[in-house]
Image: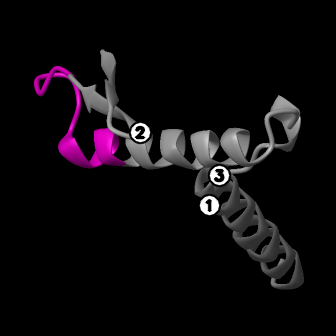
Amino acid sequence: MLHAHDAVHSIGMRLEYSTQLFKTATIEKFAKFYMEILEQVTADPLVKLSDIRTSLHLQVSNANILQEDKDDWDQVFV
């Protein structure tokens, strides 16, 4: 659960989660992606959802590129 509260010149946030369901690293990644989204929306309040990018997009894109390279090499050695 994400809790937000007013702070001096900012908004404070606290994230609660079940340690039985989630690893700390997973929640840290979620928080990082959430902050990346917030930064983009505050920089441009009219940004389209489809235009918002996070480091997750980069990871997925890189994974797809690596898979495509692997597929290409697999075809060469068939």
Answer above or below: position of 74 versus 61. below
Q: Which residue is mark 2?
A: 10
Mark 2 and mark 1 residues within 8 Å of each other at the beta carbon:
no
User: Which range of residues does the magenta coloring cover?
Assistant: 17-28
Tell me which residue sits at (81%, 31%) in the image. 49
Specify whether 5 is left or right of 47: left
- Percent x, y of residue 6: 34, 24
Q: Earlier in the sequence, mark 1 or mark 3?
A: 3
- Percent x, y of residue 50: 86, 35
- Percent x, y of residue 22: 23, 30
Q: Which residue is mark 3?
A: 54
Q: Which residue is mark 1?
A: 59
Q: In whole angstroms, how far apart are the C-alphas of marks 1 and 3?
A: 9 Å
Mark 1 and mark 3 residues within 8 Å of each other at the beta carbon:
no
- Percent x, y of residue 76: 88, 84
Residue 21's quadrant in the figure? top left
Q: Amino acid at mark 2?
A: Ser
